[in-house]
Amino acid sequence: MKIVFVTPTPFLRRMPAYRFAGEFYGQSNSITGPLILGGILKKAGHQAEVYEELNAKVDLDKLLPDTDIFCFSIMTSNAERAYELADRIHAESDARVLIGGIHATAEPEEALAHVAEGARGKPYIIEEKNFHYNISHSGAYAIFGVSKREIGVDIEKIGEFRKKVMERFFSVSEREYITSSPDPVSAFYRIWTLRESYMKMLGEGLSLEQKSFSIEIGREIRVSGESVRGPASFSETEELEGYRLAVCEDGIAAELKLIFRSPEDL
């Protein structure tokens, strides 16, 4: 699969006089995000190319015939140019187009006015009272959880059995569950992800006293202890080989729905 990253440039900055000034004063530093993503995709066996219109013309005539996905990195200033290129790509090829980045405002405070933080710093969107999200990443995977209630997600790549972590942070019953399991390593990461998802759902993070709660695994998963403020629902999956993934939602939640995406699906 061939993936092309493009950082568009507005019309004024593509003019010869502006480019001449760039050559005189020195070119700006490359946008690192597309370079990093391109490197990751190349390592995974894909063909990836990265272009910045500020430094060189993007020749769509050459790129369109064999490119599968175009990815545009944008801000407010170059968004119009990105959509202009995207319209041409859609008109002349079957390639897919992804557009993403930061839409800045003249005053950053305008954007920040729509975001607030909970007591422990967990951000939320002021106008969307029923939209909650949480993010986690580990190894080759990242997860993004959304819910109408408070939500916490955690994914961990299974590694070594971290006995000192267990002894320092886990409750007595959690330690007993792990040490009595036929697979202590898997049991350790199961407890770890469930605990992390619960703490992130609360929005407390590491400020929460680690032994003030305990994950109890029986016919269903529940949480007990002095920090428990109400019912919490847990979901898990082992669909990702070599990883543990857990989700915690405030209250009695619906069944977890997972959607997996890879570069080939985009």
Image (spheres, rainbow, N blue to C red):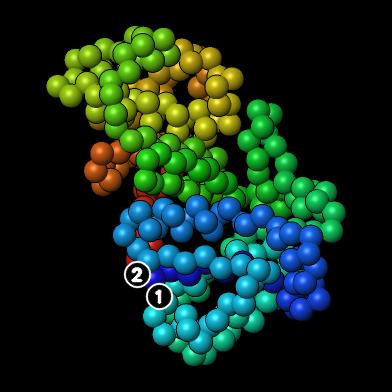
Question: Which of these two is toward me, 197 or 89?
Answer: 89
Q: Residue at x 45, y 33 (%)?
A: 197
Dot 1 or dot 2: first in sequence order is 2
Residue 25 placement, left or right of 74: right
Label 2: which secondary element: loop
Give the number of the disc on residue 68: 1
Q: Position of residue 57 (x, y in %)?
A: 62, 77
Q: Residue at x 33, y 35 (%)?
A: 157
Question: Which of these two is toward me, 57 or 251?
Answer: 57
Q: Position of residue 209 (x, y in %)?
A: 53, 14
Quadrant for the C terminus in the image:
bottom left
Residue 99 placement, left or right of 257: right
Q: Residue at x 42, y 26 (%)?
A: 195
Q: Amino acid at mark 2?
A: Met
Quadrant for the N terminus in the image:
bottom left
Residue beneath disc 2: 1
